[in-house]
């Protein structure tokens, strides 16, 4: 089991789009993503800040995507 990487928000959104999530709304610097089966999450898009592993783990658990599936799609 490998550690989760630190990602740019744009990279995370790109991976989530590949898994079928669709950007539904953006309020300020937070992008709300929804999957057709009902799973949803919020990705903060702050200029110059990355998504740390802890937040990434939380986002993955919200959308019920395993660490291995996520790392395979990078």
Image: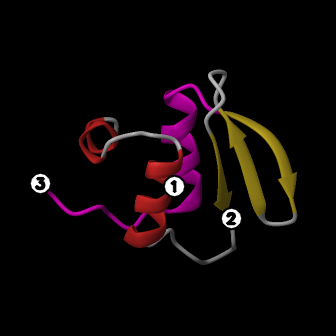
Residue 20 x, y percent position in the rendering: 57, 25
Alpha-carbon neighbours of circle 3 within 10 Å: few (<14), some, or many (≥20)? few
| 10 over 8 or under it: above or below | above
Q: To which residue does mark 2 refer? A: 45
State the image quarter where residue 49 is shown. bottom right
Residue 18 as seen in the image, left or right of residue 57: right
Q: To which residue does mark 1 refer? A: 59
Viewer-nearest of discs 1 and 2: 1
Residue 66 x, y percent position in the rendering: 32, 42
The residue at 38%/69% (across/down) is 53
Q: CA distance from mark 1 to mark 2?
A: 13 Å
| 58 over 39 or under it: above or below | below
The residue at 15%/58% (across/down) is 2
Q: To which residue does mark 3 refer? A: 1
Looking at the picture, the colour scheme in use is secondary structure
SS type, badge 2: loop
Q: Which residues are magenta?
A: 1-21
SS type, badge 3: loop
């Amino acid at each position: 089991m490998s550690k989760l990487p630190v990602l740019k928000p744009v990279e995370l959104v790109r991976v989530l789009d590949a898994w079928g999530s669709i950007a539904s709304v953006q309020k300020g610097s937070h992008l709300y993503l929804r999957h057709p089966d009902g799973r949803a999450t919020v990705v903060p898009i702050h200029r110059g800040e990355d998504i740390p592993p802890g937040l990434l783990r939380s986002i993955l658990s919200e959308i019920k995507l395993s660490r291995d599936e996520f790392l395979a799609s990078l």
